[in-house]
Amino acid sequence: MSGEVDALYIFLLVVSGIMTVAIFLAVTVFAVKYRRRSPDEIPKPFAGSLLLETTWSVVPFLVMLVMCAWGAKVYFDNSVPPKGALEIYVVGHQWMWKLQHPEGQREINELHVPTGRPIKLTMATEDVIHSFFIPAFRIKKDVVPGRYSDIWFQATKPGNYHLFCAEYCGNSHSAMIGWIHVMEPADYERWLSGPGGMGSMASVGERLFQQMGCSTCHRFDVQGRCPNLTGLYGRSVELKDGRTVIANDSYIRESILNPKAKIVYGFDNIMPTFQGQISEEGVLQLIAYIKSLSKSDRGTNVQ
Amino acid sequence: MSATPLVNPNEQASIEKPNYLNAEHSIKSWLMTTDHKRIAILYLISITLFFFLGGLFAVLIRIELLTPVGDLVSSDMYNRLFTMHGIIMVFLFLVPSIPAVLGNFVIPMMIGARDLAFPKINLLSWYLYMAGGIFTLYAVVAGGVDTGWTFYTPYSSTYSNSYVLSAATGVFIAGFSSILTGLNFIVSIHKMRAPGLTWGKLPLFIWSLYGTSLIQVLGTPVLAITLTLLGIERFAHVGIFDPALGGDPVLFQHMFWFYSHPAVYIMILPGMGVVSEVVACFARKNVFGYGFVAGSSIAIAVLGFLVWGHHLFVSGQSIYAGMVFSVLSYFVAVPSAIKVFNWTATLHRGSISYDTPMLYAFGFIGLFTIGGLTGLFLASLGFDVHVTDTYFVIAHFHYVMVGGMVMAYLGGIHFWWPKISGRMYPEGWAKLAALTVFLGFNLTFFPQFILGYLGMPRRYHAYPPEFQVLNVMSTAGASILAVGYLMPLIYLIWSIKYGRRAPANPWGARGLEWETSSPPPTYNFEETPIVTEDTFKYSREEVEVV
Amino acid sequence: MSEATALKHQFDDLEQQKESSTMGMWIFLATEIMFFGGMFTAYTMYRYLYPEAFGEASRHMNVLVGTINTAVLICSSLTMALGVRAAQLGEKRMVTRLLLATMFLGLVFLALKGYEYHEHWVDQMAPGFNYAMVGQHPREIELLFCFYFIMTGMHALHMVIGECLLTHLVIQNHRGDFSAGYYSPVDVVGLYWHFVDLVWIFLFPLLYLIGQHVEK
């Protein structure tokens, strides 16, 4: 990924370098060659040339279109995470990054990832806008309050890489930095099984689901007053107002924080809002739990 | 020796001839003046003060960044420093610099008018500018603002504990000064031209300021309403841009950049105008491709309104919107390129002298070329993701705004100084200063391109140690640059008293402003001039069409 | 004031002066369009995001007062236009009467607007200061009320400025500054007044009417 960006960079650099040298040379040569030799010298006037004007408008523009198309291609390729990526959850906070692995490991300002596997980060922020920036991987994405941002990368070489917050976020903005530790897959497995976990994200989410009382209405055995969440994740949901939405991270987040926004067909809105009662991390854990309900039939055994 | 008169003949001539400077002497005659030339002087003094204040903040920033750890000032102080540097330099120096000082001074003369269309409104703009400046200064003195000059929400509206409202009010009021200046220029250029001065004969400086004025008039009100909404949100704790209350912080960014991207062209177009005049004068040639250079000013002004989204490539706007804004950004590069090519072509077979204004023009062409071309890097989506919000962006816009606009501003000040003050500045010192500024500038900002590519984010108070070498170079350059900026301040002030008296047209330049005396009389011309020739006609020969 | 003294020093003749001030006002109005345009854009975006909430909020508006105000403003535009016509013809007393009528209608508008604001305040619908809305979408309705107060507030501010300009015109006219040959201040203030009316013509349907049909 950094290779593609660098190839584009080299192209931009070479083209601009040629242009810069050409203009510097032309200005210098003209300035020396046509320097004023006598005080009353009057050069011959020229009006201009349509041919020249057209040439130096059209040719650079065509070159620029190449820059544009190439840049867009790299951008498009990098904006869609591949399937089967390892998902890690990130919450930005004034002024730290909190990261959570699905297996339950939590980290602050540090992220351990294996080589050779695409990593997808789902990011939220508790307060202001932050921006997740790993210069070595040439990736950056603003984390905007009120929504999820995602970004992905695939590391190739083990090592430690800088993590920066790139969007100014207040007092200790420049301290909101950390390290990405890229490890061989085997080392990563060893690291995962080390201390630091509190159970997988989904199991933490399951506990939350009970604690917050979600399970009293969202039941799995019989049809409760609220929709059964088994197999919900990734499915399309028919809404009361006739629209259909895909149950993705953003949809579930919105339904927890602002349940009135999208009401499922056949149900009334009786759910209170959990805005202010649950942290962004908690929401991510609930989502991980709901997601796990689609992967196995574990959910039916609850209750 | 006994035959030597007590007063030298030049001196005597000026005593006999009344001009705008010696017409009246009271302080009231300056503060209540409606003469565009005196208002230009008021602006010159006030923006110079703000320039050096903003510069002082820049010096502190650069000294702080000498070492990787934050040791000179606290991080909170550092955030205030770069914010105040940005706000003062953008809104109180760059935006009014060439338009309000040089534009105010020469536009009426260039079009052969006695004054601008609305002299009282012109004075009102200066007062508004000062009022805006005072609000901003209040924010500085009271403790500063720490939001960055971009005022991004929700940080500015909810989280910041600094004087956001006062600074935003300052910017809001200064914005109205800018609107009224633009309005005055547009009407004057339309309605006040001397007989015979058709659109096709207008100096290119006028064309560039016409484009600038369009942006000032149409863009600034959007900034005004955006800051109003921000102020209301902060003051009344409602959720216009706050997601916790249903608002959208990215909407703020869209509205902010809808003004602030075109504003970048407010901060470069006038410089392009100055360079067109200077290049023609010191190459003694009409500007190559007059129509294209004039038209490109308007094209830049119009296209400049369509590219604001390229500041939001990583903010989560749709990737298709990103694509559209990327293409449009390349469109706006074309008219800028046309200008550079035409200036270069003007030099071809010219008769080029190396007077100080021309040195600044050379500097402008070189630095603007680099600034413009690195803009192409940033417009390329895939690459922008990596370098946006890093020092690459800082270097890019300083190349355009400082390498471009400030160079052109200094070039223009030197070019019209004989007209403004009636005195010549010391040429040797001026050349030395121009060279110092050029070298200091490059040493300051070129390393920042590399820093940005290596990944150093902007607005960092402390940074990883591997970036130190380049930061030290940058700080070294900044100290040279500071000397380069102080030199003109000293010798230009010196020249007011001790400089050689300037003739009406020291450069052999064309244009109506050179046909009246230096300094000009209060109403510019003894009688309204009638224009029969092209502005840039330096030769008696007919223009050859290639 | 005679026509000769009405000519300012920077102009060659009254024709140039009149054209300049008219053009200046048009450009100023373009500025105003961009100013209000920013608000309309933000409004449009949130309306698109929260159509039901905005529909619900518009049912809290006093459509009757809004309609009366619309009529009042349109009438004031008429008296203003007639005033400009009278100034063109040099009918001094008629100008005073029509300008005063315009001012009166403007004040009626502002008074009714103030009454509406008072109603909203009593109903606790003033975001940030006195807001206690319940209902299906309290957060979004608060947002709409923000826009309601900002947009109508900005409009009312422009009305107040218009009233000041009209007062100045009445004084000038009383002094006998205007004649059939020089009346451009009346013309220019007329342009401004019509613009402010026009803004209301957009605000009224957007804030009062557009959501009325949305089902509860």
Image (tube, grey):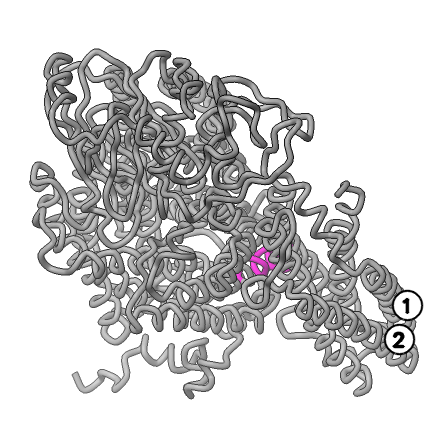
Separation of marks 2 and 1 at Cα, in angstroms? 7 Å
Task: Decide if residue A137 is on the left or right side of residue C190.
Answer: left
Residue A28 as seen in the image, left or right of residue B178: left
Q: Residue A200 at x, y = what percent?
A: 27, 25
Numbered tag placed on residue C98 in the rendering? 2
Chain letter of disc 2 in the image: C
Q: Secondary structure under badge 2?
A: helix
Residue under the point 38% across and 45% down: B275
Decide whether residue C193 is among the magenta residues: no
**Whole-percent x, y for residue B411 in the image:** 32, 53
Q: Which mark is residue B232?
A: none
Q: Which residues are magenta?
A: B181-192
Q: Are marks 2 and 1 in contact (CB under 8 Å)?
A: yes
Task: Establish if B487 lies above or below B374.
Answer: below
State whether residue B131 is above or below residue A240: below
Amino acid under disc 2: Leu
**Can you give x and y, in whole percent of width and height, for residue A138 in the image?**
26, 25
| Front in this rendered view, residue B79 or A183 | A183
Circle 2 crowding by C-alpha within 10 Å: few under 14, some 14–19, many from 20: many
If you read the primary sequence from the N terminus, does the residue marked by circle 2 or circle 1 appear first?
Answer: 1
Circle 1 sits on which residue? C82
The answer to whether residue B36 of the structure is visible from this angle is yes
Most common SS among magenta residues: helix
Circle 1 packing at 10 Å, graded few (<14), some (14-19), many (20+), is some
Question: Are the residues flagged by discs 2 and 1 from a single subunit?
Answer: yes
Image point 35% across, 69% down: which residue?
B139
Relative depth, front residue between B531 and A25: A25
The amino acid marked with disc number 1 is Leu
